[in-house]
Amino acid sequence: MRKLPTICIAVQNEMLAAALAVPVIERQLTPRETMQIGAQRYQDGTSPYPTWYLFGCQTKGVTGLVTNYSRQGLKVFLCPEKSLKADLEADYIDVQLCTIESALVRQWKQKGKKIFGYLPTYFSSKAFLAAALNHMNGTRFLPRQITFTRQSSPILPAADVKVWIIKSPYGSAGKNSDGTPYTVWLSEKLEEHLPFLLKNLKHNEKLICSEFIFTNDPYADHADHVVHKMHFLSTSKTPAQPYGLYCQRFIHRCNWTALQAQKVLPLGEFIGKPEITRGHVGNIREFGAFVEALSFHQGRVMLSIDFILPPDGIPRYLETNKLAATFAEQFDPHLPPLLDYYAQLALDQ
């Protein structure tokens, strides 16, 4: 009997535990265990999104990575990120749902293994992403911003910016790498306190001051802060491209009264909870050029790109997320969830 090729789906530790509905997971699962758990979890419509990613969800209409890979003739098993080793026995390894160092990827490739879902760890740095966009002639797609170190001069880059957002180079979902929230500052308050903020930075620590982009969205009752989250997909043969023409729109109405009174606020207090709707990107000015500037994202990987449209209509790039919680959602009614499309790609893509 011909031996089936194997694929390991590597998953961030807590994410895998959540998908399996256990407090903690310490070892890789066998292919038999993986398929048995998948059959049970697929029927559960109340399960969290990591379960949808791996095992699908009947009520959500998503098939999941395990079933899609199995249907391609692969023997599938799961492994927590902390248990990954150079001698992992698998022909294919999908690391979309975790973050791993490049040295391990090199070791796997030297052994002839094919890697899916890999994005170098330095892509999690907002400073790197801004530099990469600049290198692709995408300066006009960035908010005005500056990266400070402890040794930097405490001078903001633009006098006409009224509101700034401060964040660390590493962070997501409105939080810095240490778990503290991003903060929003009136310009005069930030100018006053910037020397103290820089003085308190640790050695080699960085701080990003970025223009807070406001909108005047006629499709959202002229809301003043509308963030678009768009699915992108790149393959081993093509750089990142938008998946369809639909996105999610996070519609915020900022608390100007509180900001004027306190001068500085945590991001969440300023923008509040969003109204989430579906949006269409077909008529966005310079969207094609914006996508071209993002082509430094390469390799077979799913991405969520956050951007915002100020009144001039030119997109401003905010960040990239490889571990988004939306890949099992169907934004475009004419396309399957991105997760399923990604898993159904030919193995040489």
Image: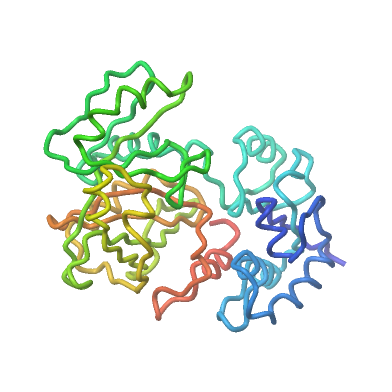
Q: Name the image colouring.
A: rainbow
The answer to which of 344 and 330 lies nearer the viewer is 330
Query: x%, y% of residue 204?
Result: 47, 21
Q: How many marks?
A: 0
Left/right placement of residue 107 relative to residue 198 reads: right
Q: Is residue 255 above or below residue 35?
A: above
- 109 relative to 38, above or below: above
Question: Would you place residue 83 above or below residue 194 in this image?
Answer: below
Q: Extreme right residue here?
A: 1
Classify residue 109 as left or right of residue 180: right
Q: Position of residue 57 (x, y in %)?
A: 62, 77
Q: Residue at x 40, y 51 (%)?
A: 239
Q: Residue at x 43, y 57 (%)?
A: 304
Quarter of the figure that contains the N terminus: bottom right
Between 253 and 144, the residue placed more toward the observer is 253
- Quick check: 228 left or right of 25? left
- Seen from the viewer's position, the closer of residues 56 and 164 is 164
